[in-house]
Image (cartoon, rainbow, N blue to C red):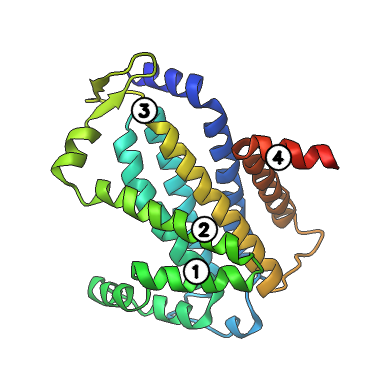
Amino acid sequence: MNIKSYKEVHKNFNEDITLALVGLTYTTYFSLAVNQDDHKNPMLDDFLDITSDSLTPSLLYQNMITIISNHVLAIIRLVEGGLDTSARALIRVLAETIFIFIIVFTSKDHFDNYCNGTNDEEARSIWYKFFSKKKIHVELKKIEKRIGLPEEIVSEINEIRTSIYKEYSSVVHSSAYSSVLGSYAFDFNVDQLQIGVGGKASKASKNTLSTLNWLLFYFAIMTKGIVSNIFEFRPKSDNETWRIALPIRECFIELYLKITYKDEYKSVTSKH
């Protein structure tokens, strides 16, 4: 069953899976690039004197990006195994992890706040105070404007972010409706549902992978804007890890635009 699901997923979603793997490669190399002992790291100068029980910004950011990378890999593997509902639940976790990372990555104050959660109770209190859904929206919109995104793009991103919370929270906060629907797989060839026990490839994974790739695209453009426009960071040309990470990021952004906006992309490129 697992082998059959894997083959069917790659037959129908090969482009989406490939794009996600390129995005995953960027997050993996970026996690290594931000915490190098022998290289200046891309935080503002006033971040450099911060430590929280020996937790430096560079180390925390590497840890957070590692979690993001592993979530991305897990989602891909779940989809390949025909476990779309489980992948959708992890999409919700991934989205919030990315959103919080961007805020903590950009702000010294939010870094301090985030690091103060040394146990479950403190972490829960900090989440409600600084990283609830409404507060995340407000902070991210500020950062999006700081890196130079136009107002209409910021508005569109906010709408997509809101829809992700709405759509994928229903999987995490289990209801009768989501439990019933989530136990079935949508057949690729006929318009019917099939019980998905044990894992079965589903046509519904198209939306799951599309959301995954949007989150990776958002992560790529935001980290690019923060590193370049806010930190004004330029890595040394001889640093091998950055020399790998940055071109892969640009490759992913270009591929995402080319695949997701085929007609618009062809129209723009034909003019140049």
| Relative horizontal placement of residue 135, taking residue 102 as reference (left or right) | left
Q: CA distance from mark 4 to mark 1?
A: 27 Å
Q: Amino acid at mark 4?
A: Tyr
Q: Which residue is mark 4?
A: 265
Looking at the picture, which amino acid does disc 2 mark? Answer: Ile
Tell me where residue 127 sits by quadrant. Answer: bottom left
235 to the left or right of 165: right
| Residue shown at 52% from the left, 81% from the top | 108
Between disc 4 and disc 1, the foreground one is: 4
Mark nearer the viewer, 4 or 3: 4
| Residue for badge 2 | 157
Residue 39 percent coordinates (x, y): 70, 68
Which residue is drawn at the image coordinates 32% and 75% (left, top)? 118
Residue located 50% across and 81% down the image: 51
Marking on residue 81: 3
Which residue carries the number 1 mark?
Answer: 140
Foreground of the two, 145 or 245 = 145
- Calculate the distance from the C-alpha at mark 1 to the C-alpha at mark 2: 10 Å
Q: Residues within 10 Å of mark 4 (few under 14, many from 20)?
A: some
Instruction: Name the residue type under label 1.
Output: Leu
Residue 208 is situated, as x and y percent measured from the top left of the image, at 41, 39
Work out whether mark 2 precedes mark 4 in sequence or the reverse, and give the earlier one: 2
Q: CA distance from mark 1 to mark 3?
A: 33 Å
Are circles 1 and 2 on residues that touch, CB within 8 Å? yes
